[in-house]
Image: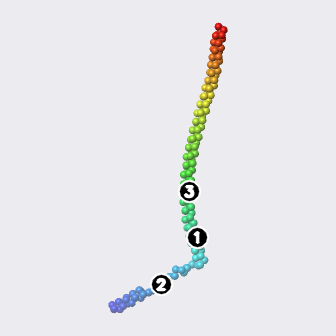
Amino acid sequence: MKTIITIFFILFSFVVLSQKETKKDTSELCFPSTVAKKILLDLNELDRLKENEKLIKIEVNELETKIIKQDSIISKFEQKDDNNKLIIGKWEEKYKLVEEDNKDLRGKLKWAGIKTSIIEIVSGAIMSSIIYIELFK
């Protein structure tokens, strides 16, 4: 009996090991061709959208760098504008000081002119009285 069981196991193992592997055809579709066409169209659309997304990401990155550069340019222009306003303020202050000095000088010049006229009148009177005294004495 042992021999029969041994022979049976040996034969059975050869049969099991000698079976051919069945290959499945992966190109066979399990759904209708119209559905397969729609799936292929969707997959193509997905591929196109993925490529489009890559391009959009590149554009967004370029726009972000452009925005950063423009922000730095704007901040530099704002600093320049602040400096120009400061310079203009200093020039206006300078002209105010010059105008005040001119006003003071005009006032002093007016009094100097009056003073000179008074001195000329007084010296003329003194000179004429001295000349009169010298001539008629």
Q: Which residue is mark 3?
A: 66
Q: Secondary structure at mark 3?
A: helix
Give me the C-alpha separation between circle 3 and circle 2: 61 Å
Which quarter of the rendering shows the C terminus?
top right
Q: Amino acid at mark 2?
A: Thr
Q: Secondary structure at mark 2?
A: loop
Q: Amino acid at mark 1?
A: Glu
Residue 17 drawn at (x, y percent)? 41, 86
Depicted 127 relative to depicted 86: above or below = above
Q: Residue at image x 35%, y 92%? A: 4
Image-quadrant location for residue 100: top right
Give me the C-alpha separation between circle 3 and circle 1: 31 Å
Q: Which residue is mark 2?
A: 22
Answer with mark 2 or mark 1, whichever residue precedes in sequence: 2
Q: Which residue is mark 1?
A: 45
Image-quadrant location for residue 3: bottom left
Q: Residue at image x 55%, y 65%? A: 54
Give me the C-alpha separation between circle 2 and circle 1: 35 Å
Q: Amino acid at mark 3?
A: Lys
